[in-house]
Image (tube, coloured by chain):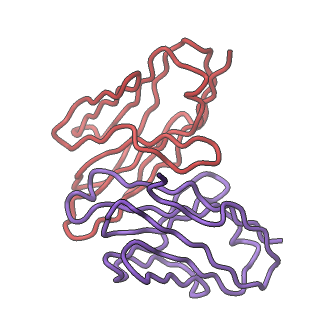
Chain colours: A red, B purple
Amino acid sequence: KNQVEQSPQSLIILEGKNCTLQCNYTVSPFSNLRWYKQDTGRGPVSLTIMTFSENTKSNGRYTATLDADTKQSSLHITASQLSDSASYICVVSPNSGGYQKVTFGTGTKLQVIP
Amino acid sequence: DTAVSQTPKYLVTQMGNDKSIKCEQNLGHDTMYWYKQDSKKFLKIMFSYNNKELIINETVPNRFSPKSPDKAHLNLHINSLELGDSAVYFCASSPPGQRANYGYTFGSGTRLTVV
């Protein structure tokens, strides 16, 4: 069964600090991995998308890394801001052809405090 | 301009009632989805339609019936609502074929509360 596990489940950091969120997956074969940010009361919004051949992808203060050998990804947030408070969801798509059923992680809830 | 819009945003209803949630996308995407997000924030796919054709139908009670009048709309009708149906329901869309790998666009969600 394909799984996507994220850690930590929740995290509280001070404004201005950096943090790293982890995603481990068992989806195989693998097509791409996405990180989404979900603000409270809103739908998920895509931050980064990486194929199996990419090691890193940045979007402003967000940098995602991918190790396809160990099936691990991380999302690094630099110089956190209060607006970074949200849930961050890792989503993995299998390379099975046809219409793909993606697997969602359970998310990491990040709270940035002043 | 809202790319994927859902209505209503909030829905409070009594057990046993029938209700519908509407979803529309103006992105020209071919594929639309319904997801359920439970209290633990886990997103689980319910249905997927491609060009009005059902392509994914997960293990969902048959009280849930999706309807796609055209590829820009995917509505969700729920019969005989139960307490366990309380959740946030998200509509999403994606471009066709392999481009679907490169991201879904989600609506802002409909918070359904069954009392």
Residue drawn at 22 percent across, 57 percent down = B99
Q: Nearer the viewer, residue A5 or B55?
A: B55
Q: Nearer the viewer, residue A36 or A94?
A: A36
From the viewer's perspective, tell me whether residue A69 is left or right of residue A39: left
Position above or below: A28 against A33: below
Return the residue found at the far left: A53
Where's residue A91, x and y in %?
Answer: 39, 49
Q: Nearer the viewer, residue B67 or B78?
A: B67
Where's residue A59, x and y in %?
Answer: 35, 28
Position above or below: B51 against A17: below
Q: Quadrant of residue A77?
A: top left
Residue drawn at 21 percent across, 44 percent down = A51
Where's residue A70, x and y in %?
Answer: 27, 37
Q: Quadrant of the C terminus of chain B?
A: bottom right
From the viewer's perspective, tell me whether residue A20 is left or right of residue A8: left
Where's residue A102, x and y in %?
Answer: 36, 59
Residue drawn at 32 percent across, 64 percent down = B29
Position above or below: B32 against B81: above
Return the residue found at the far front: B1
**How many marks do you count on the picture?**
0
